[in-house]
Amino acid sequence: MSNNKSIAIIGAGNGGQAFAGHLASMGYKIRLYDRDVPKVDQLNYSKKIQLVGKLRLESSIEFASADLKKVITGADIIMVATTATAHRPIAAQMAPLLSDGQIIVLNPGRTCGAIEFKNTLDEAGLSARVYVGEAQTLVYACRQVETGVVNVIGVKDKVLFSAFPASDTPHVLKELKPIFPCFYAAKNVLQTSFENVGAMFHPTVVLFNEAAIERGESFFFYRDMTDGLSRIIEEADRERLAVAAAYSVSPISAYDWVSYAYNGVEGKNLCERMQNNPAYYEILAPNTIDCRQITEDIPTGIIPFAELGKVAGIPTPLFDSLISICSILHKKDYRKEGRTLKRLGLEGLSVEDIIAKIQ
């Protein structure tokens, strides 16, 4: 793929700006969308994005805009780097604006992101032949320092990718591999979905440090991991692996994933590997319980895991408890907001039907 192609990036948060800066430095024409008009205006003022930390560079984008049509029209690749809870509304807005051949990549999809996105496009009357896929996790561990400046703490070496349906994966990867050598083909979107290890870490760490966060105590999200908390994460992980097995998927365990995604990380247990990962050293815990580690990971991670478990007859008591407790904590019904089988277009299907649908 030559670098004269245009890439639209949806979302100018931590990940979106990291993508924009990195891809622009490779020579790609970058357009950046965000609904935050002041942020867009600030990015347009200099049209520069600076990456510090693991990646040290400054590059120029073509433009930023709060006009979705302006950003995606004519783009060869559309990288969606919003929160996963924004996938559904973005897909609905995007449906009438798309044209044949465009590639949409969710960075990341979380759990069943590509399925929800494509289902929403279809519900909104999509007529163009587009390609939709998802990365298993965000390529970068990063934090915005200020608008236009992002600290890239780490870059993952291996990230699984799948299109929906899986038969589109070879075509999409042919276009993406020159940009992201870290992308490797997954079996299907259920594999990338069940590889959503972040959903094991994020809500559990926040929930079991809830009092400390509400008291305003600062701590490192991963580096201050304890043995007890890591055991709870591993129990949640066992539920994820059990549900995955019912769909003929064998995802990597949370323990193994830390060393798989970040070469050289060692430790005799999950707690030590979390503590020993340099990419995690500087990441602080959120300063509020109203954070995306719950507001995103429960509805777009834990809920679809539990929903798929019900279809397969696999009990998920810890997942169910996390959903209930977080719903009480935030005074909202996450089961109504989340990626249910109905929202995914999978309601009433058997395990075999679901597997056949995604191939």
Image (spheres, rainbow, N blue to C red):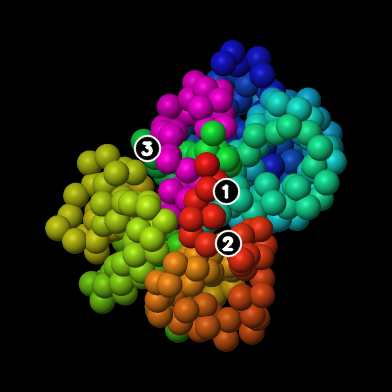
Contact between marks 3 and 1 (CB within 8 A): the answer is: no
Say few, some or many: other residues with alpha carbon within 10 Å of mark 2 (under 14 / 14 to 19 / 20 or more). Answer: few
Residue flagged by tag 2: what amino acid is it?
A: Leu
* Residue 133 visible in the snapshot: yes
Contact between marks 1 and 2 (CB within 8 A): the answer is: yes
Determine which quarter of the picture holds residue 97. Answer: top right
Q: In this view, does 126 lie above or below 244?
A: above
Cα distance in 3D space between marks 1 and 2: 10 Å
What segment carries the magenta color?
168-196
Q: Mark 1 points at which residue?
A: 357
Residue at the image point whose x is 26% and y is 72% from the top: 231
In the rendering, at what x and y percent does residue 297 appear? 52, 64
Is residue 187 one of those drawn in magenta?
A: yes
Cα distance in 3D space between marks 3 and 2: 32 Å
Residue at the image point whose x is 26% and y is 57% from the top: 255
Mark carried by residue 207: none
Cα distance in 3D space between marks 3 and 1: 26 Å
Q: Name the residue under label 2.
A: 349
Which of pointers 3 and 1 indicates the residue nearer the eye?
1
Q: Name the residue under label 3.
A: 158
